[in-house]
Amino acid sequence: MARPKPKITHLGGEHCVTGSCHLLRVSDLNIMVDCGLSQGGDPALPIGQWPVSPVELDYLFLTHAHIDHIGRLPELIDNGFAGEILCSHPTKALLEPMLHDAMGFSGYDDAGKKAILQHIDELSWGFEYGQAFKLKKGVTFSLGRAGHILGSCFIRFEIAHPEDGKPFSVMFSGDLGNRNTPLLCDPDPPPSCDLLILESTYGDRNHENRRHRLAHLEDALAKALWDKGKVLIPAFALGRTQEILYELDRVFATPSFRARLERAGIHELPVIVDSPLGLRLTEVYGSQREFWDREARELLRRGDDPIDFQGLYACHRYRDHLQLLQHPGPLIIIAGSGMCTGGRILDHLAAGLADPRTDILFVGYQAHHTLGRKIVEQSGRPNGTVTIDGRNVPVRAAVQVLSGYSAHADQQGLLDWVAAMPERPGGIKLVHGEEEARRVLGEKFRAQGYACIVDGAAPR
């Protein structure tokens, strides 16, 4: 008898970067991996067109707590989902603040939000990394560290043969991160599998050397020291905000940067986190220190909290945000959203894009059709403009893209991660990437002898 193989249907994120949602069916067991919101015009299949209804789902696994992986959870609950939600312990701690914020833009009143969040809390369970757990119908799973954000994981399922017990294994990479990322443990080496569902966000490029990024960040800040302008850093509230705080703490501690401050006559360069959600999630990060990497825990042991330092300020209230818009600088403002699709960063961009003294540092991926991507594309053009709240705004600010801060593994990182498997996967299906990224990465894998599918159904 042939080994049972799962049927995999990609409900989101198959041919684009956001909206990850994958359905795994084994006999009469229905497992969903992620249930994310689409952004920047990426397609999303309506729930009514899914091959199974939310009521029929037994389990929902979450690879991490970014909204493009969990954002449709309230909609799933509204449509009758009552199965178990399984994730890592830190991801469970991050669900409530992330979804509470997202639901504020979805028409839910306070009572509705409270009821859904309580229901999600009751259904969700946190699990340890590196251990095997049993579901039912002969299916087991294990979580590995993905190194993308706090709590991120890849998930490996084993489906046992009904007679001889020999399993078929399928692994979902989720979003893979990089080595040497602040606060985070490196991605775990992957176990072997028969089928790998692999992200490909940066499948067509490599990042700058991450070991040099502190120096690049220091250089990027130097201009603001001399022209006394603002540095705007659009950053996702979860992951990137905390990583940038860590890096700024390291930069401010270097003698070369302190010397630059003195030469510019600046006694303090304030850093303002203008994001209520970012501030709350930074508190959650602080409560999950047991999951930090060794370097960050060693800094704590020596009395240096790397995400809290002198000159760091919190902007909670909206009226303080409005006052901050009038501040001439020099100062650094970290605000969401990371792709400039909403949040307080829009006000800062509307006020500062036309000012040549403004510096904008992009430290994350900018998807097609997002304001962040448009700013990057329009920067440096003689008459470059973007539209914010219906108004054309000239792009005269200095725009820099620091790719070394991506939370996603680059092409070489993805190739190396797969190569670290004890045995080659039986097949690879590329998802979570734009067409060119999937195409180029697929060619790289096929050149190395892997069976790799870029479009179409997963090999099975």
Image (cartoon, rainbow, N blue to C red):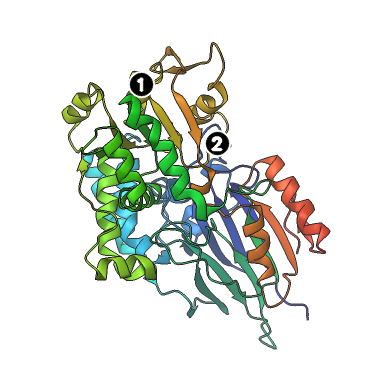
Q: Is residue 337 visible?
A: no
Residue 423 drawn at (x, y percent): 72, 76
Numbered badge on residue 352: 1
Q: Is residue 70 left or right of residue 196?
A: left
Q: Is residue 32 visible?
A: yes
Query: Which is more N-terminal, label 2 or label 1?
Result: 1
Q: Give the residue number, with chain letter if any, for mark 2.
A: 367
Indicate the amino acid at tag 2: Ala
Say few, some or many: other residues with alpha carbon within 10 Å of mark 1 (under 14 / 14 to 19 / 20 or more).
many
Indicate the amino acid at tag 1: Gly
Residue 359 drawn at (x, y percent): 40, 28
Q: Nearer the viewer, residue 56 or 280?
A: 280
Question: Do callouts 1 and 2 mark residues in contact (Cβ within 8 Å)?
Answer: no
The residue drawn where x is 51% and y is 74% is: 142
Furthest residue in direction bottom, as rendered: 164
The vertical placement of 158 against 390, above or below, is below
